[in-house]
Image: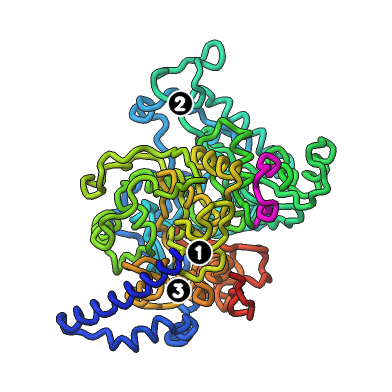
Amino acid sequence: MAVRRARERTFLLTLFFILFMTVSSLKLGYSLGNIEDILARMEKQPRTDYDDVGGSSVFANFVSTVQRIRSPKNYKNPKVVDDPRFEGSTGKDTPKIYRPYPDYDSLTWQSKHRAPFVACLGARNKLLNESLDDQVGVYVGTPQGFPHPMFGSYDAVGLDGQVSFDRYTRYGAYGFGEDEESVPHWIKPAKVNWNQIRWGELQKQCVERNANRFTKEAATHAGSEIPHPDLPAEERSAVLIRTYIGKEYSENDLQVIRSMVTELALQTGGEYEVVLLLHVKDESLDIKQEEVYRRVLKENVPQEFWDMTVLWNTPLVAERYKDLDTNVIDVHHAQWLPVQWFMREHPEFEHFWNWEIDTRFTGHHYEYVDKITAFARRQPRRGLWDRNARFYIPQVHGDYETDYRDYVNRSEPEGVWGPAAVAGPGLKIQVYGPSTPTLFPRDDNFEWGAGEEADFICFLPIFHPIGTQWVIRNEVYGYEQGRELPRRACLITHSRISRRLLTALDEENLAGRHMGSELFPVSTALYHGLKAVSAPHPIFSERPFPPQDVDFIFNSGVNGRTGSTRFSPFSWGREIPFRDTSWYYRANLAGRLYWNFLGWDKGGTGGKEYEHRHGRVCLPSILFHPVKDVRPDADSMNYKFDSELGFVPID
């Protein structure tokens, strides 16, 4: 009953909003059209909207190559430095070295940290702070006229949007192009026998060299010193790359994993540790037996990654939860069970990246995790759930930290403040989050939570699923409120999650309570008053929709939310506008741009002849998903949604 009433209220609010905007438009001298036209447009399938733009493509007609790079005036980034191997060459097509790390040797950094940074060895058996062959290269500038993102921005999350990468500067250090004879504007690194590398051992040695930074105890061995023993130990994070039995690893897969270990773990002295978390789908295999474990490992993982791989299966990670419905413990419904298990097994980590193996980031991995984490950390809690609940469109909303925040605050001034009230007679929740500093959010000057680490970071809006027709909105199990339970959702489980939120998930599962994988962490954060953040990273689209139309289609809910009504773009049959974006669970833009980036022809762009005419393809930092079967002839641009294929949703 409560859900039905909520839906009725949502519909009435939508009608009221339309009436209000219609009256306002008359006063302001422009017309939105009559109510029938507006409702008809809102009901119209997004496929028709696509027909309205004539099937035109932004990137099929844009040449994104090194030759078209335009360097910004007065560009300053101390992390971008000249490569001494190109001494005397100053053209725009001369790559520079990109090291977006803290200045570990500076007095400022050392005065704020417990113990000094110690450089680590890389794959070429050289200290990484001294090895030019192990660095990532960039070009200063981007191709002239590079399209704007449809959502999000570089400035909002702090990424450098004024540098570009090509396949050699990005992956050359990790084996790309190592058998090519001569490549203009690129110096081939020393070749590595990758099968002889033990990435797990390199990570282990690295964190041992830096143990004084991370341990809470006294100095780890005789003769070592901790200059600032009163300062807290640095926190470590695990990056869990989700893989599975039977996966075939392309050369690109290998290069990307090598880059993640080098850039996140080895170059930081062990701040991060990269793990292949391997799902053993065949539950008849007893992976608790050492012989079986080794055999599965050797048959399913490239040799260089054997000692950084952890195996799991459903019986292993679910055996703790005696009251959990056995119908919802599979990896589709319970993506977080192996992460919870890993968290309990590894007390040395405070945060965990659940990293989809079909994710790609064309930029530097450390810049990505560092800037996204910093963005989430600086967000104040006031209005945060409401800022999370919309697609941020800079051309419509203005600056994220000022204009957008003010707009959202005007739209929903009394939003979520502290833990959401969900407890009933049979539902007792021990809240993990802090108490609110004031009784009402309006009494806080956007200070509470600023500087606090986020418990959950995801990469699409955290939306209201109730009222939408999103296909798994009702995957709620064991809660006495059932479908009436207040909740939130964030699609694609690629995200960062804290130990305390995983502990809360663990306790929910122990009590027999559970939700769908894209509901569970954000909804639990909502109940516990934990800090969840949607990062507005740049998401691009093939389709040239005007920003106002993008806002209309994607923020079609109550008060400009992206959820809460059946018009939500996440609803069944209304996801089609995501099809040509760079980030969604089914999206085709990665299938063009990333393939072109690797030098391959796809969708009429890229490839040998194309680059002979236009030059080498380059891109700024872009987060892509999905990127599967990374081979030249892969069918990477024909993803469709189930609603397009004739499937019928089961409510």
User: Is the residue 294 above or below the residue 382 in the image?
Assistant: above
Q: CA distance from mark 1 to mark 3?
A: 22 Å
Q: Which residues are magenta?
A: 317-332
Question: Mark 3 and mark 1 in contact (Cβ < 8 Å)?
Answer: no
Give the x, y percent position of residue 112: 36, 27
Q: CA distance from mark 2 to mark 3?
A: 48 Å
Most frequent secondary structure within the magenta stretch: loop
Q: Amino acid at mark 3?
A: Arg
Q: Amino acid at mark 1?
A: Trp
Q: Disc 3 on helix, strand or loop?
A: loop
Q: Which numbered disc, 2 or 3, marks the residue that appears first in the sequence?
A: 2
Q: Nearer the viewer, mark 1 or mark 3?
A: 3
Nearest to the observer: residue 375 or residue 525? 525
Q: Give me the disc on residue 233.
A: 2
Give the x, y percent position of residue 531: 40, 45
Q: Give me the disc on residue 466.
A: none
User: Which residue is denoted by mark 3 in the rendering?
Assistant: 566
User: Which residue is denoted by mark 1 in the rendering?
Assistant: 583
User: Is the residue 432 above or below the residue 572 in the image?
Assistant: above
Q: Amino acid at mark 2?
A: Ala
Nearest to the observer: residue 69 or residue 384? 384
Residue 564 in magenta stretch: no
Give the x, y percent position of residue 317: 68, 43
Which residue corresponds to the image point at 39% horizontal and 18% vertical from the top-left? Answer: 230
Q: Quadrant of residue 627?
A: bottom right
Q: CA distance from mark 2 to mark 1?
A: 35 Å
